[in-house]
Image (cartoon, grey):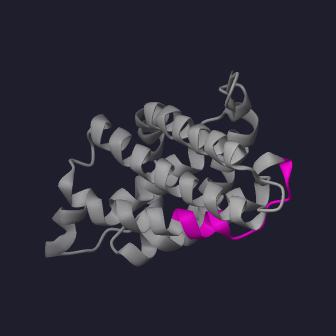
């Protein structure tokens, strides 16, 4: 994995998420605003093509840390930095372990893996942040946030194949392929 181009791309993706992502947002009356998580799509893309699960988990941690710095907590509370980094890291490791069961270039595989990643990562984040804000959270708030996380996962997974087409163009810059005989396994 080439980390400097990855961090630059992560910054650009998060910049697009905070600016252009707001144009893609929609509001569900009883749930709240649902915005696609473009950083999750990048984390899934990286997990599909890196050599080791450690690379996938480190990339997920970096993206989750950046998202933690940008996000607020549930119910408008101050967010703790770290829960999204942990959630992205664990979800990236899961996607890495599941990737051999899918054809990586298929849009349906990217859709399914992004759905799994988003639901796992965001449900873990909502749960951890709700535990940290237990004094002001109710079970109704928690269930609304879980539903919002699931809708975010579905919305993100629908746009994931489109974003992965853009990320495919940067794969050579991000992912270093081994030389020699084992190179064919990473294409």
Give the quadrant of the N terminus. bottom left
Residue drawn at point x = 42 percent, y = 78 percent: 54
Give the quadrant of the C terminus. bottom left
x, y (%) of residue 59?
A: 52, 67
Could you say which quadrant of the image residue 77 lies in? Answer: bottom right
Residue 60 seen:
no
Q: Is residue 141 magenta?
A: no
Q: Does residue 59 appear to the left or right of 96 in the view shown?
A: right
Q: How many marks?
A: 0
Residue drawn at point x = 34 percent, y = 57 percent: 48
Seen from the viewer's position, the closer of residues 151 and 174 is 151
Could you say which quadrant of the image residue 32 lies in? Answer: top right
Seen from the viewer's position, the closer of residues 112 and 144 is 144
Residue 148 seen:
yes
x, y (%) of residue 132?
A: 75, 67
Residue drawn at point x = 52 percent, y = 40 percent: 150
x, y (%) of residue 90?
A: 47, 68
Could you say which quadrant of the image residue 146 lies in? Answer: top right
Residue drawn at point x = 75 percent, y = 68 percent: 81
Q: Which residues are magenta?
A: 76-88
x, y (%) of residue 141?
A: 71, 44
Q: Does residue 155 appear to the left or right of 169 in the view shown?
A: right
Image position of 178 with respect to 149: above or below: below
Image position of 144 with respect to 67: above or below: above
Give the residue at the far left of this rendering.
181
Seen from the viewer's position, the closer of residues 108 and 182 is 108
Q: Is residue 79 magenta?
A: yes
Give the residue at the far front of this rendering.
139
């Amino acid at each position: 994995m080439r980390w400097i181009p990855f961090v630059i791309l992560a910054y650009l993706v998060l910049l697009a998420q905070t600016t252009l992502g707001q144009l893609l947002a929609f509001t569900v009356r009883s749930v709240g605003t649902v915005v696609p998580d473009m950083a999750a799509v990048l984390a899934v893309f990286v997990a599909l093509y890196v050599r080791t699960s450690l690379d996938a988990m480190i990339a997920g941690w970096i993206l989750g840390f950046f998202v933690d710095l940008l996000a607020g907590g549930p119910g408008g509370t101050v967010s703790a930095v770290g829960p999204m980094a942990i959630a992205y890291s664990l979800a990236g490791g899961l996607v890495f372990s599941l990737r051999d069961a899918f054809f990586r270039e298929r849009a349906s595989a990217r859709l399914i893996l992004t759905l799994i990643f988003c639901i796992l990562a965001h449900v873990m984040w909502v749960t951890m942040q709700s535990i940290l804000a237990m004094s002001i959270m109710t079970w109704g708030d928690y269930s609304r946030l879980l539903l919002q996380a699931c809708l975010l996962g579905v919305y993100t997974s629908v746009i994931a194949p489109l974003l992965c087409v853009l990320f495919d163009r940067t794969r050579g810059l991000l992912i270093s392929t081994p030389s020699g005989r084992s190179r064919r396994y990473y294409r």
